[in-house]
C-alpha cells in the first residue's frame, strides 16, 4: 500500500486566497483525521471522520475552515479566506477502528 | 482537561550514548499511550503502544515504560544513532467517548557524531 497520500506537499498562497488540501487515506481504513502542527502548539486535531461522516469538528479553529469526505478514498480541508496565522503543516491520518493511526507526509502551508 | 506534558523540550547527545525522554499526562479515563517518532519533513510513525496493564514495551533500541499510578511514561533510547535524530511525541488516548488522542508537544532529539 502507498500509505496515506496528501497533496500538495507545499503550498504558498497570499492572505485572503482559498486553500484546498487533499488526502487519500489507506484503502480499507474507516477513520480519517486532519491535524495541524505548529512549533508553538504541536499537533492539534482539527476534525475526524468515521465512515465518511464527520464525528467531531470541535478542533476546527473557526468558520474559515471546512472539511469534507465525499467518499471513502478522498477528503479535503479547505481554508477560505486564508490568513498568515494559518501557516502550519497539515497532516492527514487514517486508521482501522481500534488500531494505530497512519500519518501522511503532510502539507506545508505558508500564507503570506 | 486532558493534557500531555513532555520533557525535555530538546536534547542533544553524542552518538552511542543513551537517553531518556519523559511524558506526564492527565488524560482520564486512560486507554493507551503511544510514543511516535517524527523525522523532519515527515509524519509521525508509531514506535510503541502500551495499555493500562503494561509497564514496559520494547522496539529494538527503544524501550518505553508506563506507570499508570503516577501517570508517567518514559522512552529510553539505547546506543543512539544519527538516525535517531527526530522529534519524539507522546500520545495518550482516552477511553471515554470517541478514543480521541491527546498529543504532547514532543522532544526534539539531536544526535551528534
Image (spheres, coloured by chain):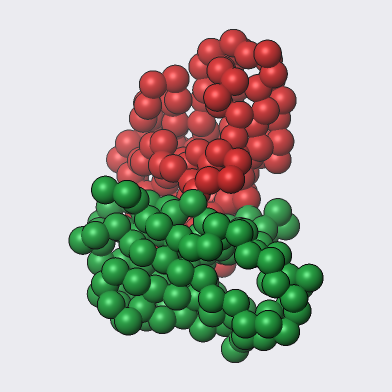
User: Where's the C terminus of chain B, which quadrant?
Assistant: top right
Q: In the picture provided, is B8 more to the left or to the right than B41? A: right
| Residue at image coords 46%, 69% | A22
Work out whether residue A46 or residue A14 is closer to the camera in this orientation and state it: A14
Locate residue B43, reporting x and y percent.
50, 49
Up/down of A100 relative to B38, above or below: below
Q: In the picture provided, is A64 more to the left or to the right than B65? A: right
Locate residue A12, reporting x and y percent.
69, 66
Q: Colour of chain B?
A: red
Locate residue B79, reporting x and y percent.
53, 13
| Residue at image coords 51%, 83% | A66
Q: In the picture provided, is B75 more to the left or to the right than B99? A: right
| Residue at image coords 44%, 31% | B64
Q: Colour of chain A?
A: green
| Residue at image coords 56%, 18% | B81
Q: In the picture provided, is A94 more to the left or to the right than A87? A: left
What is the residue that sits farthest to the left in this orientation? A28
Amino acid at each position: 500500500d502507498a500509505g496515506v497520500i496528501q497533496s500538495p506537499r507545499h503550498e504558498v498562497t497570499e492572505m485572503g486566497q482559498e486553500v484546498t488540501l487533499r488526502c487519500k487515506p489507506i484503502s480499507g481504513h474507516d477513520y480519517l483525521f486532519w491535524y495541524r502542527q505548529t512549533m508553538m502548539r504541536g499537533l492539534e486535531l482539527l476534525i475526524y471522520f468515521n465512515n465518511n461522516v464527520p464525528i467531531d469538528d470541535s478542533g476546527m479553529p473557526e468558520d474559515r475552515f471546512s472539511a469534507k469526505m465525499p467518499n471513502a478514498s478522498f477528503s479535503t480541508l479547505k481554508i477560505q479566506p486564508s490568513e498568515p496565522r494559518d501557516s502550519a503543516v497539515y497532516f492527514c491520518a487514517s486508521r482501522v477502528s481500534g488500531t494505530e493511526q497512519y500519518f501522511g507526509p503532510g502539507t506545508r502551508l505558508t500564507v503570506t | 482537561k486532558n493534557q500531555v506534558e513532555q520533557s525535555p523540550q530538546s536534547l542533544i547527545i553524542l552518538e552511542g550514548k543513551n537517553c531518556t525522554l519523559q511524558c506526564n499526562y492527565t488524560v482520564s479515563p486512560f486507554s493507551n499511550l503511544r510514543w511516535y517518532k517524527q523525522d523532519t519533513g515527515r509524519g509521525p510513525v508509531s514506535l510503541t503502544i502500551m495499555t493500562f496493564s503494561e509497564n514496559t514495551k520494547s522496539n529494538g533500541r527503544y524501550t518505553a515504560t508506563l506507570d499508570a499510578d503516577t501517570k508517567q511514561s518514559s522512552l529510553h533510547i539505547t546506543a543512539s544513532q544519527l538516525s535517531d535524530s527526530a522529534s519524539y511525541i507522546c500520545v495518550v488516548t482516552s477511553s471515554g467517548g470517541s478514543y480521541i488522542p491527546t498529543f504532547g508537544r514532543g522532544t526534539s532529539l539531536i544526535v551528534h557524531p
